[in-house]
Amino acid sequence: MNQLLFVKSSVFGDGGQSSQLADRFIERWQSHYSQSDLVVRDLISQPIAHFDMETITALSTDASEQTAEQKNRVALSDQLIAEVKQADAILIAAPMYNFAVPSQLKAWFDQVARNGVTFKYTENGPVGLLEDKPVYILATRGGQYHDAGLDYQVPWLKLILGFVGLHNVKVVLAEGLNMSDAEKSIQSAQQEIDSIQLS
Ligand SMILES: Cc1cc2nc3c(=O)[nH]c(=O)nc-3n(C[C@H](O)[C@H](O)[C@H](O)COP(=O)(O)O)c2cc1C
């Protein structure tokens, strides 16, 4: 079974440009593998609350002493991490909002990057604990940033994924989507999706 975890974060839902590119990728995935499974983590229809002190306390309290509310908070983080671990590959549809990723996607990473579970600190610095697997990022943005040193979306995604042990990252960029050559940019991203090598 080839399980794909799709992490969806456009506020425009299915109509979002990143969501539409993701649909194309998912079609490819499903036609490539005779047996496949899709798990959708929709961060817009089911938003994850921002990380706060209550959550930090819950995660650092021994299971035998947790309140019902703390258990719920730990269970959510456990569930999100389990989805990542169980997947054979991860697809992240990531628009650029205000130069970075949507806050809903940041909230997801705040739960997934967990000390002692998905990363740990050693004498030689942090080490990611997740088993490496392909991560496909479909990054959309209204303007043109590539190579301009102003991209806090894709470099950050690569940084946090690598931090938890996910280094096998393929990025498809669709830039300038609020500019005149948007259609050309979408077509080029579609072609890139169609030519991704699936194992
Ligand atoms: C709240 C918001 C903030 C945005 N900020 C930026 C930005 O900082 N830079 C940019 O190039 N485009 C920005 N855009 C445009 C989006 O990146 C662009 O429309 C992208 O295709 C949206 O992807 P989506 O349709 O999957 O949500 C912003 C759009 C929204 C709704």
Image (tube, rainbow, N blue to C red):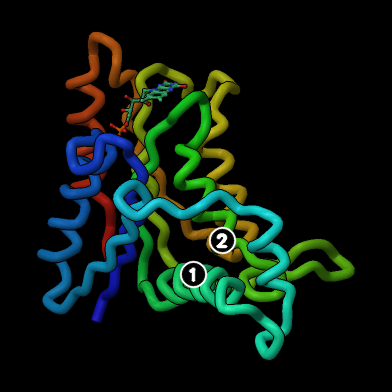
Q: Position of residue 61 (x, y in %)?
A: 73, 77
Residue positioned 29% across, 11% down in the render: 179
Mark 1, Cα crowd under 10 Å, few <14 / some 14-19 / many 20+, is some
Mark 2, Cα crowd under 10 Å, few <14 / some 14-19 / many 20+, is many
Q: Is residue 144 toward the left or the right of residue 1 in the image? A: right
Count numbered badges in the picture. Answer: 2
Check disc 2 and report the residue beneath it: 111
Residue positioned 18% across, 36% down in the render: 15
Give whichever of discs 2 and 1 has the lower sequence position. 1
Instruction: Tell me, for residue 182, which label it has, or none.
Output: none
Q: Is residue 199 visible?
A: no
Name the kind of residue labelled 1 in the image: Leu
Check disc 1 and report the residue beneath it: 76
Q: Position of residue 70 (x, y in %)?
A: 61, 73
Name the kind of residue labelled 2 in the image: Gln
Picture quadrant of ligand 1: top left
Quadrant in which the N terminus is drawn: bottom left
Which sits in the foreground, 32 or 126?
126
Q: Which secondary structure, mark 1? A: helix
Residue positioned 35% across, 20% down in the render: 142
Residue, far top = 180
Q: Is residue 145 visible?
A: yes
Q: Position of residue 33 (x, y in %)?
A: 16, 72
Q: CA distance from mark 2 to mark 1?
A: 8 Å
Residue positioned 71% across, 57% down in the render: 53
Residue, far right = 123
